[in-house]
Image (spheres, coloured by chain):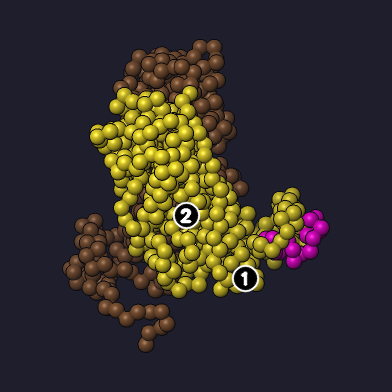
Chain colours: A brown, B yellow
Amino acid sequence: MLMHGEEAGPVPPGLKDVAARAGVSIKTVSNVVNGYVHVAPDTRARVQQAIDALGYKPNVAARQLRSGRSGVIALAVPELQSPYFAELAGRIVHAAERRSWTVLIDQTDGHADRERNLVAGLRRHAIDGLIFSPLALAGEELARGGDETPMVLLGERVWHGPADHVAIDNTAAAADATRHLCASGRRRIAAIGAQDSPSAVTAHQRLAGYRAALAEAGLPVDPALVAEVEMFHRADGAAAMARLLDGPGPPDAVFCFNDLLALGAIRTLLDRGRTVPGDVAVIGFDDIEDGRFSTPTLSTIAPDLGRIAELAVDLLAERLGEGATPAAAPRELRVSHRLVARESTLGR
Amino acid sequence: MLMHGEEAGPVPPGLKDVAARAGVSIKTVSNVVNGYVHVAPDTRARVQQAIDALGYKPNVAARQLRSGRSGVIALAVPELQSPYFAELAGRIVHAAERRSWTVLIDQTDGHADRERNLVAGLRRHAIDGLIFSPLALAGEELARGGDETPMVLLGERVWHGPADHVAIDNTAAAADATRHLCASGRRRIAAIGAQDSPSAVTAHQRLAGYRAALAEAGLPVDPALVAEVEMFHRADGAAAMARLLDGPGPPDAVFCFNDLLALGAIRTLLDRGRTVPGDVAVIGFDDIEDGRFSTPTLSTIAPDLGRIAELAVDLLAERLGEGATPAAAPRELRVSHRLVARESTLGR
């Protein structure tokens, strides 16, 4: 009998059909569909091909009932209006979709109390796991809560922290950016993005990388060339650049701690009649799309965002999988980055 | 007796304390907290002030049990990597937060089958309502499904459609943008953003506004000046601009159907040695932040995004409120827009 609103149609393909086509057991198909990681990569690929070919759709509701899982994970980022986090969110949605997970995206605005609520599990009543890019919290604060929901941390805030963790080598990347400016013969290299707060780990690490590269090049660190910002937004970069230009000895190059700061800084430079990179070379960090079409195009550090998203989802899947041992020690995975040199340092 | 993990602390403020401080009944506080719309604005403001002052936190879980609601709504947008949708999402998260709603953001990539799944309710098992900005679906396709979950539609795709609907007057806004170019004496005004697909309602309406404004100014519509694009991304705008410049009679102005297309078009113009707006004036649509810091800054149409977010959340709250009549006719609310003239049309 059909329920009201249902349609009689061809019988949809099932696990059995996928298994037959892929030449594996039903259990193996189930393992792939449920996102367990202990499946050999080529077996997983064969099963995925069969799933795609047959148009198999796992019965999500039934699976959730069996597993006691909701099929929903949360992703918490400081702000979606930052292109870096928007792109990261898009990539995590895609990575999660391959496991038929729905991603609940939660924007914390980097408020410490909202991040604390997240970690304490207040908002996690119906989700299987959390991928969290903290802004206000760092270190042991993230360990509070005692919630058993698996969590994967993104970003550089919590080495040796309480959970699985994926990040690039932030200090090394900042040094690479600064070295690129040194190599072009610049001698008064400013930094835009320093932050005072002890929890501003990103800013501290990028500043450390900047300092290390200057020392390596035999250049002094001039405190007048280090500009603080409140946020990593375009307006902050524009204002900081204006302060540097009005300062005692203006810079001939600037390393900005993200691309938005750099785009704001470039706008101020051009407004003040300076050429980029002629008078002042500028490099950012993140490789957001804006910098590929701006005038001048923006030199930057490109983290491997696709890899970060994949690893975050894989780590969560592993913690959620059959046979997972929640007590297993947190893992720390480093993702690579690369320097992308464009017009803002090379010229046209 | 305390449960394991609970802490004994000061008693948190309750509904009664908020009511006393605001000088209203407990029922009124409850109505505000639960997002019912039939509360006078100044009463609502007074209650909100008392809530903020006392740091009152509604017991979300208990409320959900009583109401049978999850406290979670979904927002479905085509892509978070588009700054327009990222900003819209951020604003809706903030508007929903005032009602203690968590927003599940779902990225559809504008795929028709994923949008159909949404409308059919496949993914809505644990959510109270849906705010949906469709890209692939239009008109009656959105009415399918028979799911009772309240839905609010954003954007211009479905006038007289099956659900509450919030949008700007897209055709009028496009005409305003084109008129601005006509008023500066431009005569060969191109359009970038036309799309062939019958479901590309945004593109069709913006093209209609462009045509209407040209007719009004006594200018012919030259099909060679209308450039089609696959997506509304920077790369599409850059490629379309190159085709126009290589065409029989290059334009002296361009109306781009969004800001990303315009930023891509400007990059091509500058690459080809053209000045903006000297040789070619450019106007976009959306007022994303990128255009406020680009060189030149970008003239554009600014929809009242804050108002769109508030109205969407308010309409959903009304459908979810006590005494709501689900059968009430869908409402269509127009939000205002304004022209923002910057360097890309005015010069510096």
Q: Quadrant of residue A306?
A: top left
Which structural element holds mark 1?
A: loop
State how far apart marks 1 and 2 are (Cα): 24 Å
**Which residue occupies 60% across, 63% down?**
B317
The residue type indicated by label 2 comes to: Gly
Q: Earlier in the sequence, mark 1 or mark 2?
A: 2
Mark 1 touches mark 2? (CB < 8 Å) = no
**Residue at horizontal 51%, vertical 69%?**
B149
Chain of the residue where label 2 is placed in the rendered structure: B
Give the image location of residue B21, x and y in percent. Answer: 80, 55
Magenta run includes residue B20: yes
Where residue B155 is drawn, which disc sits there?
A: 2
Position in image of residue B326 (x %, y %):
57, 72
A346 to B331, vertically: above or below: above
> Does any portion of residue B284 appear in the rendered image?
no
**Judging from the image, what secondary structure is the residue with disc 2 in?**
loop
Highlighted range, magenta: B19-33
